[in-house]
Image: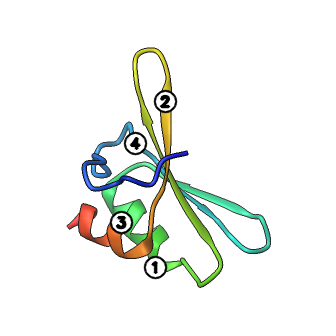
Amino acid sequence: MRTDTDNLPLKAKTVPLILIKKDLSIITAQNTIEKKSLIGKYEEGDILLSVWPGQWYSDVFVVTKENAIKLLG
């Protein structure tokens, strides 16, 4: 699990944003509009993750709400 999200290409459709709610329900988003909507559903205590797929392995990132907003512009 990584936390260095400054260069994460969050606008890419291949890099999903995943919201895990406090009640353990999960919401995913693929495109920028869905991702911005998903961020609006974030509440204190929820977890935001993103997966950057690679050729041989994928990296999972813990993303802060503030950084997600910045990365999506």
Quadrant (top left/top right/bottom left/bottom right) for the C terminus: bottom left
The residue depicted at 41 percent of the width and 61 percent of the height is 34
Depth check, front residue: 20 or 29: 20
Q: Element under label 3?
A: helix
Q: Element under label 4?
A: loop
Please rate how many residues cluster around mark 3, counting C-alpha atoms within 10 Å: few if below 14, some from 14 to 19, many from 20: many
| Residue 66: numbered disc | none
Please rate how many residues cluster around mark 1, counting C-alpha atoms within 10 Å: few if below 14, some from 14 to 19, many from 20: few
Q: Do the residues labelled 1 and 4 touch (CB within 8 Å)?
A: no
Q: Element under label 2?
A: strand
Numbered circles on residues, count: 4
Give the CA separation, mark 4 to mark 3.
Answer: 12 Å
The residue depicted at 79 percent of the width and 73 percent of the height is 23
Q: Element under label 1?
A: helix
Q: Is residue 15 above or below residue 45?
A: above
Give the CA separation, mark 1 to mark 4.
Answer: 18 Å
Lateral position of residue 58 relative to residue 72, left or right:
right
Front position among marks 4 and 2:
2
Residue picked out by circle 2: 58
Sequence order check: which comes first, mark 4 or mark 3?
4
Sequence order check: which comes first, mark 1 or mark 4?
4
| Residue 68: numbered disc | 3
Sequence order check: which comes first, mark 1 or mark 3?
1
Q: Please, what is the three-letter code of the amino acid marked with disc 3?
A: Ala
Residue picked out by circle 4: 15
The residue depicted at 35 percent of the width and 54 percent of the height is 5
Residue picked out by circle 1: 40
Give the CA separation, mark 1 to mark 3.
Answer: 11 Å
